[in-house]
Amino acid sequence: MKTVIAVAVLLIGGSMASAAQAAPSAETAKRCMHYSYLLYPYKRPGSVRGSGERGAYFRDCMARDGNVPEPAVAKP
């Protein structure tokens, strides 16, 4: 019985360690945040209604681990 519990603890601990290694890096977060502000530039709060597009793009970029094409910047 004790060996079964020990094996279960080792299996659970091993699966948790691999999940922690799969987290995106700080560089990935910086790149995704930079790209999201290039595509959806900052606008003064209250001047326009927020759509959440920047946040959605950031979450999608992080889900892809930063493997998104570099956005082309539109000239005003």
Image (spheres, rainbow, N blue to C red):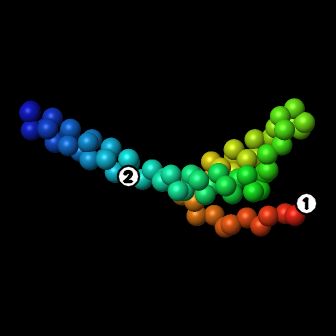
Query: Are the residues tagged 1 and 2 within 8 Å (C-beta)?
Result: no
The residue wearing badge 1 is 76
- Mark closer to the chain start, 1 or 2: 2
Placement of the N terminus among the 4 image quadrants: top left
Residue 51 spot, x, y in % from top left: 80, 40
The residue wearing badge 2 is 21
Identify the residue at horizontal 69%, vertical 57% (top origin).
35
Identify the residue at horizontal 83%, vertical 43% (top origin).
43
Which of the 4 image quarters holds residue 39? bottom right
Q: Amino acid at mark 2?
A: Gln
Residue 37 spot, x, y in % from top left: 73, 52
Identify the residue at horizontal 83%, vertical 34% (top origin).
45
Classed neighbour count for the residue bearing mark 2: other residues with Cα under 10 Å, few (<14), some (14–19), many (≥20): few
Instruction: Inspect this view and state whether residue 50 appears.
Output: yes
Identify the residue at horizontal 53%, vertical 56% (top origin).
27
Q: Amino acid at mark 1?
A: Pro
Classed neighbour count for the residue bearing mark 1: other residues with Cα under 10 Å, few (<14), some (14–19), many (≥20): few
Q: Is residue 55 left or right of residue 14?
A: right
